[in-house]
Amino acid sequence: MVIKVCLAGATGWAGSELARSMAKTPDIALVAAVSRKHAGRNLGEVLGEPRVTCPVYASAGEALAGPCDVLVEYTKPDSAKTNVLAALERGAHVVVGTSGLTDEDYADLDVVARKRQRGVLACGNFALTVVLLQKFAEAAAKLIPQWEIIDYAHDDKIDAPSGTARELAARLSKVRRPAPTVPIDRTVGPREARGTTLSGVQVHSVRLPGYVISAEVIFGMPDQKLTIRHDSGNSARPYVDGALLAIRKVSTLVGVHRGLDSVLDL
């Protein structure tokens, strides 16, 4: 069976690479795209890829009017939740690649997804190296009681922390909450110097030219430390294979699931 996909954010950095790859994937058909800037055009003309033939719409609501099995959400945090809800209401499963949604957002979406018996697979990062970082970090958190996360990104990334960092913090907090020697509320000086607290974990965001996307978790014990880090390159290609896998597997889920490893045998 061919999976019909609507891609929101189809002309962006990651979305456009995914669209080109879906055009070469026989079991996935890109039937609609969302891009306010290019609404009314053919996506193949916009991307310079003749194998892509779907129309571009200004909103997810318009794009979802036709038959669609899966919405892939690759837009911005301020529109992502609305798009996901629109897809669930129309009976589609959802793959979320947009960062910036909060734990509260996902809790709200989980209620709707379970009511509709649909799956939402949210991945802060589709790269295999990030999946491994998450699994290795969870193993380390079982043995080491203190850690902090640093997330690095390009200077024009508007959301902070990144979806990768948010997802990592949420996952590690389920293993255990870190126990800093000096509680954060006893910090002497500006509290912000210790970063933000997400799921009980301290997260620090760096936004500078020269970075693409990197995530680092540092574990510390007396006289020793462990650093686990992921660095991405300039291409969006590392995220494509994971996104295609998510599209194929999301229909096996009900409710919100965080992380690509939800559908991997790890």
Image (cartoon, rainbow, N blue to C red):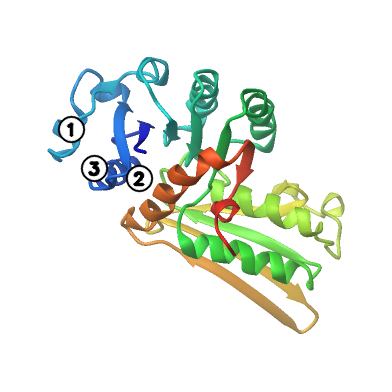
Amino acid type of the residue that numbered disc 3 sits on in the rendered structure:
Ala
Q: Is residue 192 above or below residue 224?
A: above
Amino acid type of the residue that numbered disc 1 sits on in the rendered structure:
Val
Q: Which residue is mark 3?
A: 23
Side (left or right) of 178 relative to 25: right
From the top left corner, tell me how far across and down residue 127 is, in percent.
Answer: 45, 58
Amino acid type of the residue that numbered disc 2 sits on in the rendered structure:
Ala
Element on which disc 3 rests: loop
Q: Residue at x 84, y 62 (%)?
A: 179
- Locate residue 145: give its quadrant: bottom right
Q: CA distance from mark 1 to mark 3?
A: 14 Å
From the top left corner, tell me how far across and down residue 191 is, in percent.
Answer: 75, 48
Closer to the camera in the image, 262 or 193: 262
Residues marked 1 and 3 touching at CB (< 8 Å): no
Inspect this view and state whether residue 162 appears: no
Q: CA distance from mark 3 to mark 2?
A: 15 Å
Element on which disc 1 rests: helix
- Locate residue 210: give its quadrant: bottom left
Residue depth check, mark 3 versus mark 2: number of the one nearer the observer: 3
Residue depth check, mark 1 versus mark 3: number of the one nearer the observer: 3
Task: Please identify the quadrant where the N terminus is shown.
Answer: top left
Q: CA distance from mark 1 to mark 2?
A: 15 Å
Q: Which residue is mark 1?
A: 46
From the top left corner, tell me how far across and down residue 57 is, in percent.
Answer: 30, 20
Q: Residue at x 73, y 65 (%)?
A: 147
Closer to the camera in the image, 243 or 34: 243
Q: Which mark is residue 14?
A: 2
Q: Earlier in the sequence, mark 1 or mark 3?
A: 3
Q: Residue at x 44, y 42 (%)?
A: 247
Task: Please identify the quadrant where the C terminus is shown.
Answer: bottom right
